[in-house]
Image (cartoon, rainbow, N blue to C red):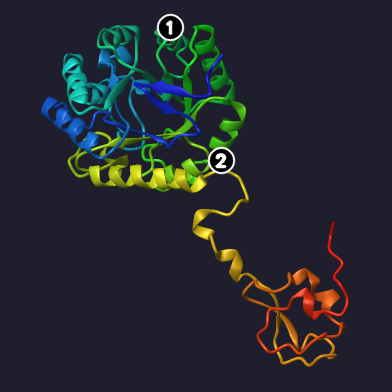
Amino acid sequence: MFKPNIFIQGREISSLKPPYVIAELSGNHKGDLSQALTMIDRAASTGVDAIKIQTYSAETITLNHNGPEFRLEGGLWAGRTLYDLYQEAHTPWEWHEELFQRAKKNNITLFSSPFDKTAIDLLESLNCPAYKVASFEINDIGLITAIAKTGKPIIMSTGLATLEEINEAVTAIANAGGTQLALLHCISGYPTPIEDCNLRTISDLCQRFDFPIGLSDHTVDNTAAITAVALGASIIEKHFTLDKTDGSVDAAFSLEPDEFILLKQETTKAYSALGMAGYDIKPSEQGGREYRRSLYVCKNIKKGEIFTEQNVRSVRPAKGLHTRYLPQVLGQQAVMDIPFGTALSEQHLSIPLKKAP
């Protein structure tokens, strides 16, 4: 049975908490350990909740083959073989211990997406606090089962998956004893056009599953992420780069540090704006009710004069009789002289009002 919330290094992730913002480093370190370490420092300084890396090698994720099915068509990486792309983009395994240490020094959570069982073994040896299942691995039931058996929280992206495939993967995690799971709506387009986001899927996933739902976002700005929070997203993941112009592999759909600061701030504000359903008066509204409409004398009225629409009106403020009583007031006689600008009260009337029970 999955829990309605998950915890990663003490941070609760649920619909009742501000969104958990993840900076995905991916291959934007350009194969340079010093740049990867700097990225951790800079990402931590933006206020994000976690940093994510990917644990694979070209050999563990694909084959070194030049056939057409191993060559990418269209998009950012058109013409490249899978092996060549992953050889450039992977995070060397010998870096991992130093990356985890650097995150600890920055007091920020670091976790990873493992792409085979040997990657899980490495990450377990480093006490990785949680695991991410990438969209392209959601149909690898053996890998998902192995991740679930660690007992760690799992965040799983759903890009390219049908609802049946999502349910199959969720069931596999449950069958392997997993209890902490979150799903991320994801469009695996790089970058994703804003019109392809289909963010209403987040609301649908929230109705289908009783655990945290979020967004893995590959658009080029923060619009989709902020909207996702308004639709119920508890997690936001976006790719991080030091410089969009540095030629790093995912730079085209990554955010720079200043943009990540805004992402964290704006998604937190979007969550705050949701509040709770209710109709009580909020602190910022205190006193406002006094300036709503009520019944006022808009001309001098003599004793015995008839109340009409010419001498009684519904105006601001709200010191007089409620506007609902205007039909009962009209046609009555004034029992005293009433000056212009007086808040009409029942003592001015010749006939008592009939008030609703």
**Residue bearing mark 2:** 200
- Specify the amino acid type for callout 1: Lys
- The part of the image, by quadrant, that contains residue 108 is top left
Q: Which of 303 and 204 is in front in this view?
A: 303
The reply to whether residue 67 is visible in this rendering is: yes
Q: Which residue is drawn at 48% across and 30% down?
A: 14
- Of marks 2 and 1, which one's residue comes earlier in the chain? 1
Q: Nearer the viewer, residue 30 or 349?
A: 349
- The part of the image, by quadrant, that contains residue 249 is top left
Q: Which of 356 and 127 is in front in this view?
A: 356
- Specify the amino acid type for callout 2: Arg
**Quadrant that contains the C terminus:** bottom right
Rendered position, 110 above or below 214: above
Percent of width and height locating residue 60: 30, 12
Q: In this view, does 3 lie to the left or right of 255?
A: right
Give the number of the disc on residue 211.
Answer: none
Q: Is residue 37 left or right of residue 53?
A: left
SS class, disc 2: helix
Crowd rating for badge 1 (residues with CA inside 10 Å; few <14, some 14–19, many 20+) = some
- The part of the image, by quadrant, that contains residue 135 is top left
Q: Residue at x 11, y 28 (%)?
A: 34
Q: Which residue is drawn at 20% across and 30% down?
A: 40
Crowd rating for badge 2 (residues with CA inside 10 Å; few <14, some 14–19, many 20+) = few
Rendered position, 145 above or below 32: above
Percent of width and height locating residue 225: 42, 42
Give the number of the disc on residue 149.
Answer: 1
SS class, disc 1: loop
